[in-house]
Amino acid sequence: MEYTGIGFRKDFATSFLEEKNLQPAFIEVAPENWMGIGGYWKKIFKQVTEVLPLTLHGLSLSIGSDDELDWDFLKTLKSFIKEYNVQVYSEHISFSKCNNAHLYDLLPVPFRYEAVKRIATKTRQVQDFLEMPLVLEIVSYYTPIAAEMEEHEFINAIVENSGCELLLDVNNIYVNSFNHHYNPYAFIEKLQLDKVNYIHMAGHEKVADDLIIDTHGQPIIDPVYNLFEHTVQKLSKPVKVLLERDFNIPELNELQTELTRLENICTKHWNYATTHA
Amino acid sequence: MPQPTLKAFAEEKKLADYCRTGTYTRIQGIVPGRVQYYKSLVWNVIDDSLATAFPLTKQLLTQKEWDDCVRLFFSTHYCNAYQVWKMPYEFYTFLAREPHVLKEKYPFLISLLQFEWKEIEMFMMEDRPALEYTNQGHLLIDALVLNPELEIIRLDYPVHIKQPSDILENDKAEYYVLIFRKPDTSDIEFVELSPIFVWLIENIIHNQHSAYRLAQEAANLFGYSQEDLIHHFTIFLSQMQKQKLILGFKK
C-alpha cells in the first residue's frame, strides 16, 4: 500500500496486531482517544505507531462554534503530534461544543459569513500554534441551519480566508447530495481541488426514502467508489486516502479488500500520471 | 450563560440546547423532521459512554431511573472533558454533588459510581515511572519499591465485595480499597485493606522505611504487639509481592 490507510480502532486493535492480514499504508486515530493515556492501550498504540505512519483526525476542536479555542487541549495535542511525528492533523467544519459544553458529536455550522469569519480566525490561530496546516473536512449534515449562502460557497470562503487545506470525504459528498438533492460531481467541480490534502472514504446507511445517515458502519457502495475515482482524476497531486469503519466491523480481510480496491484506483490514475508527467 | 449576538451562533446554540435538553426552539432554515437525528446521535454517545463506564450502576437502576438520571446530567451539566472517556467522571461527581432522590433509594450509589470510575481511571491513566529497584532483598529489612500505579480509596459501602442488590444501609462503614495496575498485563486489581495496612503502605511510599521499622512504629502508635505486626506484615507483603504490587527493593 502506498496511498491508503485505515482508521485504527480499539475494536480491532488486537486482531490487527495478531492476524496481520490488514496492511494499510498508515493509520489514523482521533487524538482525543489516545492522548494522555497509559497502560494497555498505550502499549498497543506504541506497537502500531512504531511500524506505521500516523495521521490525526480530531473530534473536539469545535472550529465552527463561537467558543474560544481550548489552549490546554492544543498544548497537549502539540506534544502528541511531536512525539508521534504526525504529518497530518485534520478536523471537521462543524461544531461539537457550545457555551463550552461538549456535545461529543459533530453538528452543522450555518452557512453564513460570520461563521466563515470565526472559523478562519480560529483556524489561523490553530495553524500558527501547531506550526502546521489544519486540514478541514466537509462534513455530512442532515439539515442546513440558517443558511445564507450555498454550501460550496461557504467551504470555498473558509479555504480562502483561513489558508486551511481540505479533507474531502467523498462519502459525505455523496450523502449530502442525496439528502439535499444536488449533483455530487458538480459539487466537487466547484471546490478548490488544489487545496485537497486528504480523502476519506466510508460506508453509510439509508434510514428513510429521503435520508442517508453517515454511519461508517457499512462497506463502501459502488456509486461512492465511482465518485471517488472521478475525484482522484480531478486532483492535481496524489494525497493520502483513508478508509473509515467505526461500527459493525467485519473480518479484517474484508477491510483489506476495500483498501485494495481504493489503492488500485489511486495507483491506476496517480502512478500513470506520475510516469507520464 | 451569555447569549450569542450573531445569527450563526444564536442558531447553533438553539440546536445545541435542543440536543442537550430536548426542548426545541424554532431554528431558522431547517428541513422539518431532521433535527431529531442530531438529538438521537448526541444522546446515543452520552448514554453509551455512561452505560459502558458504569455497568453495575446501570444494572442496579430501572431503565427509567437510568434515563432520567442521564438526562438530568446532560441537560443541566456543561460537560468539560474533551475526551469522551473522561466524561463519566463528571457524571459521578455531578451526582455526588447534587441532591438526588436516587441517593436516598440507593444510599451506596455514590460509592458504586466512585468504584466503577476508579477502575476506568486506573486502567487509562498515564504510565507512572517506578523507582529503580533490585530483586535481591528482604521484605522486612530492606526499603521496598512499590508499583507506582496504585491508589488507596475510601468507600462508604462495600461495593467492592458485595453485589449492589445485597448491600444494606447498615453496611455503611469505612472501607479502604487498594487499586493498582499490574505492570505486565495492565489489568486492574483491587485489594481490601484494614487501616493498619493503609498506614503501612502510605509509610512505605512516603517515608521509604523498612517494614521492620514500621512494625516498631506501629506497635508504639497503635498499641499492638510488635511480634504480631511483624507476622501480619510478612504475610501481607509476601502476598503483595506475588501480585506485583511490590516490584522489588530499593537500590
Image: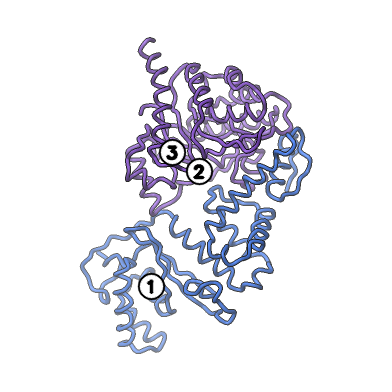
On screen, residue B25 versus residue B34, left or right, reads right
Q: Is residue B31 above or below residue B84?
A: above
Q: Kindly state the secondary structure of the residue where label 1 is placed.
A: helix
Q: Colour of chain B?
A: blue
Query: On the rendered image, what quadrant is the C terminus of chain B found in?
Result: bottom left
Which residue is farthest right?
B26
Disc 1 versus disc 2: nearer the observer: 2
Name the residue type under label 3: Ile
Where is residue A20 shown, x and y percent of the image?
A: 32, 40
In the picture, the disc for residue A247 is: 2
Disc 2 versus disc 3: nearer the observer: 2
On screen, residue A59 versus residue B236, left or right, reads right
Chain identifier of the residue bearing label 1 in the image: B
Q: Kindly state the secondary structure of the residue where label 3 is placed.
A: helix
Q: In this view, does A198 lie above or below B12?
A: above
Where is residue B248 shown, x and y percent of the image?
A: 27, 66
Q: Colour of chain A?
A: purple
Where is residue A257 shown, x and y percent of the image?
A: 40, 32
Chain identifier of the residue bearing label 3 in the image: A
* Mark 2: few/some/many CA within 10 Å (<14, 14-19, 20+): few
Q: Is residue A165 visible?
A: no
Mark 3–mark 1 Cα distance, whole angstroms, equals 38 Å
Q: Mark 3 points at which residue?
A: A81
Q: Mark 1 points at which residue?
A: B201
